[in-house]
Image: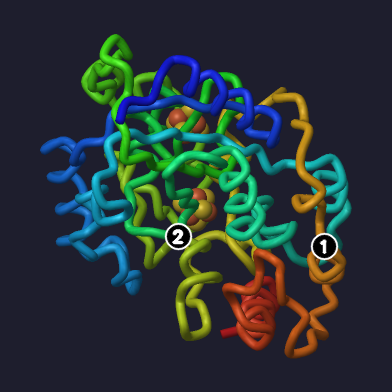
Amino acid sequence: MTLTWADLQLLAERASQQGFAESAFFRLSQPSARFQEIFAKYLSQKLHAGMNYLENPARMHPESVLPGAQTGMALLFPYRTQAGEIALRSAKQYRIARYALGRDYHKFLKKKMKQIAEGYNARGITDSAPFPERYYARLAGLGFIGRNGMLIHKEHGSYFFLAFILFPSELPNDVDNQIRELAHPDFMECGICTACLKSCPSSAILPGGLIDSEKCISYQTIEKKVPPVFQGKKHNYIFGCDICQQVCPYNKGIPLPKVAEEMQPTAISLQLLEGNTDLREDSLHGTALQRRKPEGIQSNAMQIDNLLNNKK
Ligand code: SF4
Ligand code: SF4
């Protein structure tokens, strides 16, 4: 089956109605040899630290996500909110990465994708399947990869979630199918800027746009199963880190997007920003913070207190 231009238009309109800032279609094929080579180097150097799930070979085979998948729809969902920015500015104690201030995005983005693809044979994913999301979003023409490893859209910056709908259907023949990674090499749009490299507190950004996860505060505070070991300059992030996005010129001066209610900071996020780490067992349920259990957040906070007080 082939998706028609009318299908593409309908799907794009629905995406816009669901609050996605951008959408673009692309032909699904295996990631290029160049990407596979870079990713293999990343894994062989153990830059993924303890994130063993990244070694899953299915990552290079999109048909493992949806048998017969031929077309992808890449979607950008901005997550900054006015309330979140105000809360971060007045935070007394700790910081949380912007994306994690609200509800668990996996759930509500999946619902939105279901509504977009209603009536079609399709599968929606967002950080929920072995799929090199930034690679495909760039292939779809939604941005370039910056030195900080993020996908950057010239108009929307990098504060957005990526989501994808895969279809076991072809694109119309006359849809552009160029390999954009050749047309837009990594960092091309960074120019001479190195703000993210200079600002990363733990020097986790390596030349070449790879991130040393073991050093990255985001990995340390979210993925690492034992108390984090912070290296380098002081910071006060207890969940995630977005310093390398905050300093990026592409994120300056972007108007705050119209966002879903789900992205508004949760009461528990506001409580943590104030320094209150008194959490019940179910406190984080339904929030983006639930990837770390309450005792994990408390342990992160304790490490931050030690770091700020210069204790060993
Ligand atoms: S998320 Fe933070 S620690 Fe990780 S690379 Fe960016 S600035 Fe560095
Ligand atoms: S801060 Fe500068 S170097 Fe880093 S990703 Fe943004 S534009 Fe590129």
Dot 1 amino acid type = Thr
Splitting the image into 4 quarters, where does residue 189 fall? top left
What residue is shown at x 52% (from left), y 83% (from top)?
Answer: 227
Q: Position of residue 83 (x, y in %)?
A: 87, 46
Relative vertical location of residue 146 with respect to residue 55 in this rendering, above or below: above
Q: Locate the C terminus and report the quarter of the image it occupies.
A: bottom right
Disc 1 CB within 8 Å of nearest ligand 1 atom: no
On the question of residue 256 being in view, the answer is yes
Element class at badge 2:
loop
Element at label 1: loop
Q: Residue at x 61, y 83 (%)?
A: 296
Q: Residue at x 57, y 41 (%)?
A: 118
User: On the image, which quarter does residue 166 sit in?
Assistant: top left
Q: Is residue 254 above or below residue 67?
A: above
Can you tell me whether the CB of the residue at mark 2 lies under 8 Å from the nearest atom of ligand 1? no
Q: Residue at x 49, y 52 (%)?
A: 126
Which residue matches tag 1? 266
Picture coordinates of residue 91, whole percent (x, y): 84, 58
Q: Nearer the viewer, residue 168 or 215?
A: 168
Q: Nearer the viewer, residue 190 or 144?
A: 144
Q: Does residue 194 appear in the picture of this structure?
A: no
Marking on residue 128 = 2
Query: Residue 218 location, x and y as percent?
Result: 52, 61
